[in-house]
Image (cartoon, rainbow, N blue to C red):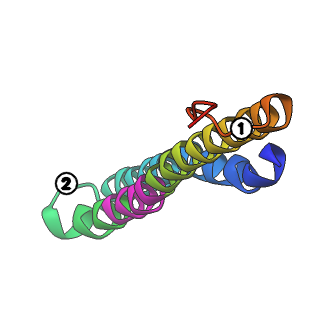
Amino acid sequence: ESSRLENGLTLLATVGSTAPFVGLLGTVWGIYHALIRIGASGQASIDVVAGPVGEALIMTAIGLAVAIPAVLAYNFFVRLNRVTNAKFDTFAHDLHDFFATGSRVGEVKGK
């Protein structure tokens, strides 16, 4: 049952951990293009650099916008999985005690 609860967690962990790097790759790519434009124009004016640097920042933001919810969802589901497993364990122990002793957990015989 635990393995069924963990389905999809690997994908969430992978997306959460790699999305910032994809955003960083976009940032490096955008800055590279900004430098190429500076070299081609021979001047470092804001109108030459603004477009590629803006694209670079957008890529960073997209990477973070994907990673942050994925990591939050991963942590939520890992916690939910632990709580559910703990409840299953408690139920299994209570059921075993019921069949072994014939009474519920915490119930005193003779009352």
Check residue 63 for magenta coloring.
yes
Q: Predominant secondary structure in magenta?
A: helix
Q: Residues within 10 Å of mark 1 (few under 14, many from 20)?
A: some
Residue 14, horizontal then vertical, whole percent: 65, 46
Q: Work out which quarter of the rendered image holds the C terminus and state it.
A: top right
Where's residue 12, x and y in %?
Answer: 62, 53
- Magenta segment range? 57-69
Query: Is residue 52 on the magenta stretch?
Result: no
What kind of element bears circle 1? Answer: loop
Among the 4 quarters of the image, the one containing residue 94: top right
Hey, what amino acid is under mark 1? Answer: Ser
Q: Is residue 84 above or below residue 53?
A: above
Image x and y of residue 34, in percent: 35, 57
Residue identified by numbered label 1:
103
The amino acid type of the residue labelled 2 equals Ala
Foreground: 94 or 70?
Answer: 94
Q: Is residue 97 left or right of residue 71?
A: right
Which is more toward the observer, 81 or 42? Answer: 81
Write the residue at 79% across / 29% down: 101
In the displayed structure, 93 sits above or below 67; it is above
Label 2 SS = loop
Q: Gap in Å between the C-alphas at discs 2 and 1?
A: 82 Å
